[in-house]
Image: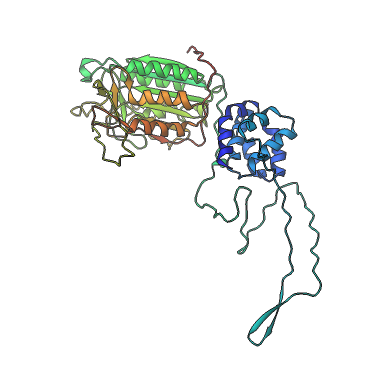
Amino acid sequence: MEERHKRILQRNRVNLVSDLNPSDMYDGLLSKGIFTQDMIDEIKRSGTRRDQARQLVRDLETRGSRAFPALIECLREKGQHSLPDLLLAGEPQSQPLPLPVHVRPVVRPLPVYSHVDTVVTPVYPSQPVRPLPITPVYPSQPVRPLPTPTTPSLSPEREFGKPRATGRVRRDSIQSYKMDASPCGHCLIINNVDFEPQSELNNRTGSNIDCDKLERRFQSLNFIVLVKRNLKQKQIRQELSALSKKDHSQCDCCVVIMLSHGTEVSHNRFPGAVHGVDGPNVPVQLITNYLNGQNCPSLQGKPKLFFIQACGGGERDTGFEVTPDEDRPCIGGTDDQTDAMPMSSSSDSLSTPSDEPDARATLPTPSDILVSYSTFPGYVSWRDTQAGSWYVETLDNVLEDNAADNDLVTMLMMVNHEVSQNSAKGLYKQMPGSFNFLRKLLYFQVLPCQRPIQA
């Protein structure tokens, strides 16, 4: 598809998802060769009408230069004139859109060669050979031509002369999670600010700013938000256990946000741990186990998201020199602090007690889980006492600007890039990252206005 047409679809994605009826488009796009039956079946399996419309629009962008005019033609055939008018509003009127053309092959007679000495002279038949009439046949199911050594198999989106990419997963084969329940799910925020003296950890000034931002943000994404402050290690585990015992059968997603000091611990799957205000920590691996498919059956097959604003260790990253066009740092304030455990304290990591069967650390690798870390394992995470942490501030801004149009993994890459441009005290850097076990794309609901849902 031409870039200008892609931009039109992207600019009008919200209206298309809202008004487009995908079932009216399937037969027309199939008969015009834009989609195959397999692709249409895949779109139908993506979920609700809105999910199917969103998937259809994304798939159209991969189907070559004829996809956009074919969409316009199908919409007009079905009497949906408002959408074509909207899409064509930015198109030049002097150049009408080309409609799909069915090309008839040209049959030419092959020459017959006679050999005279060493000269090869082509001899053509005395009478012209009349080509057999070609009648188009439309089978009930699309027939894929078998490739031969001399004739490559051409798909609708592949233009002649361009090599087929190998080893790349087709984006149109990726489904999206169902995310249209209301409310979408539960969101638990644990915000540890005031630490007890025996913990030898500083208070986390500025964390309340992070907590308020995330509470408002996930309410605007149609989550029931529950905030718990200043929890000890045992209380953290109790809240996670209570969340795992809820009935999530009417929800589509679950979110856990940890705002605390952090440290390194040994792990099999997810690195790091977060501290209770009394000092002892809870490993991130154990935190995720509370909500996996075995311990929380009503969340099986549904996305479980964990956002960890805590240090991954005690190292401070000074970065490395880059070329001038890459070096665009944003200088942090003088009030930047870290969420690291002092390096002298390294024995507070606790193993899973045998009397708590609802959270075992040796379960198989979980599916449908994403853990987003504010910093790379082993390094500190920076927090401004006046504005909150770099990671949470950036995450909140990216969700606000992009949640209506982009999937979660794409938005987390935006967060990674933005945070990596910051510098603490003109010297130290930070690099967020995530462990992604999601199987599908995840698009949040975005409410037209912030409507808090009480927990």
Q: Is residue 290 left or right of residue 145?
A: left
Q: Is residue 247 left or right of residue 44?
A: left
Q: Front-most of 345 and 122?
A: 122
Report x, y in % for residue 309: 34, 25
Residue 355 makes an appearance in the image = no
Report x, y in % for residue 310: 31, 26
Q: Front-most of 288 and 176?
A: 176
Picture layout, residue 100 above or below residue 424? below
Report x, y in % for residue 173: 57, 42
Q: Is residue 92 left or right of residue 340?
A: right
Q: Is residue 122 left or right of residue 419?
A: right
Residue 276 location, quadrant: top left
Q: Residue furthest left?
A: 344
Picture layout, residue 248 above or below residue 96? above
Report x, y in % for residue 388: 32, 20
Picture layout, residue 376 above or below residue 237? below
Picture layout, residue 239 above or below residue 343? above
Total residue callouts: 0
Q: Front-most of 87 and 194?
A: 87
